[in-house]
Amino acid sequence: MRKVGCISLGCPKNLVDTEVMLGCLCRDGYVATPQINMADVLIVNTCGFIESAKEESIQAILEAASMKRSGSCKTLVVAGCLVERYQKQLLEELPEIDVFVGIREIEKITDLLEAHGKTTKPISDPKYIYNESSPRLLTTHPGTAYIKISDGCSHACSFCAIPKIRGFHRSRTIQSILEEARRMVERGIVEINLVGQDTTVFGSDLGEANALETLVKELGKVDGLRWFRIHYAHPHRLADGLLDAIAETQNCCKYVDVPLQHVNQAILKSMGRGGNKKLFTELVERIRKKIQGVFIRSNFIVGFPGEDVVAFEELQDFITEAQFDHLGVFTYSIEEGTPAYPLGDPIQNRTKEKRMRILMEMQQAISKRRNQELVGKTIEVIVEAPHEETDLIIKGRHSGQAPEIDGNVLIVGGEPKLYTIQNVKITEAHPYDLVGMIE
């Protein structure tokens, strides 16, 4: 049997693609191995969203190519976003790559491997999105998984290359998602994270009004599903009905991930998104009014063309007022082929980096204050894994902490049971992490 290993880069949506590829290969007789240096077939599933992600992907491909020269690897497969954007260049500059797998070809990976060296190639379906029948080999911690409810994007955010990479927005059916969720629960999953490029537009292409609201309510009826969480909500589509559904559905985490990107009206207009500081302030207030005890996460871009000192100060003021629980800040990355590309990249990198540091230092103080509100309380925590630095600490997360992107609850006492949800009394608070003991 041929062993297959994988390096998966980028977002959780990409990770789902990786898991589908591995599932298809295992179904077809391959054996997955976590030891990539022992793999006969090595897959690098790339991210091509921004410049730093492209650089990371290229570095991973080069490292994989070196394993092909010196290790057991016989076939190097490159998949994902970078293939969609730069397959011709990769083919010319990296002859070590044997097989390319596009985003819409992931379930044809076995055919592509077997056709290696031949001229035949499966035809991509522009409407492709995996479903409940697609094989998947889960690679997340046991107990936690992602479900991709849609793929692609039909928005026109001027900074973003995703529509060119992943194609137009396309949704799965509610029944498909519910069936996959039920199967995951049967496999021991207690927490599901719903992902898509914009989850709030889910179902619109199928003519289903308020589809995400309906999905939330239906997932609330899935026996054994303790938690589920929604990611990537567009700020202009957070309707009251959806917020009410999140608030009223017991197993839906009181967590709203709403990337705002900026608050200055001129910048947002240039980004192709719309909105302003007043509207977003009202949005945050409405979320907190509708969902008691909600945890809110947002993302912002600094250094977009036209962001002067006044616009940046407006963003600072907003973050101070909004008091987000979690925040991500990214420096603007100019991307060829996007509507913003003709604007150039006039703001110096050191200015972008400085602005990012200012916002993150502000947020550290905010996050610590908000975390301190949990000290002395007993909360539910999903218990995940020993800490990387010591087996004396077990890592977990409460329902307001999403995997990988938010902080952790560090469990230092009691009897933790991995991959279950237990009560933890919080004893300490830090900017990102909490400390507690199993009760």
Image (cartoon, rainbow, N blue to C red):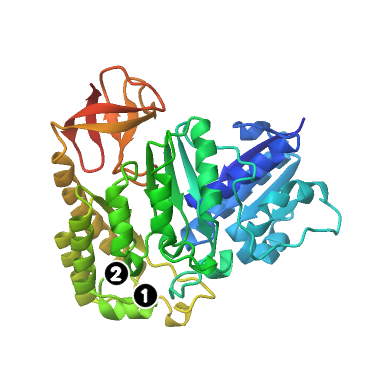
- Residue labelled with disc 1: 273
Residue visible at 15% across and 60% down? 320
Instruction: Pick whichever, 291 or 222, lies toward us.
Output: 222
Label 2 amino acid?
His
Q: Is residue 390 above or below residue 14?
A: above
Between discs 2 and 1, the one toward the N terminus:
2
Q: Which mark is residue 262?
A: 2
How many badges with numbers are in the image? 2
Q: Dot 2, crowdedness within 10 Å: few (<14), some or many (≥20)?
A: many
Q: Position of residue 393 (x, y in %)?
A: 31, 24
Residue visible at 26% across and 78% down? 265
Left or right: where 269 falls relative to 413: right
Q: In which quadrant of the rendered image does the N terminus lie?
A: top right
Q: Position of residue 182 (x, y in %)?
A: 51, 39
Q: Is residue 139 among what the camera can see?
A: no
Q: In which quadrant of the rendered image does the C terminus lie?
A: top left
Instruction: Pick whichever, 207 or 49, lies toward us.
Output: 207
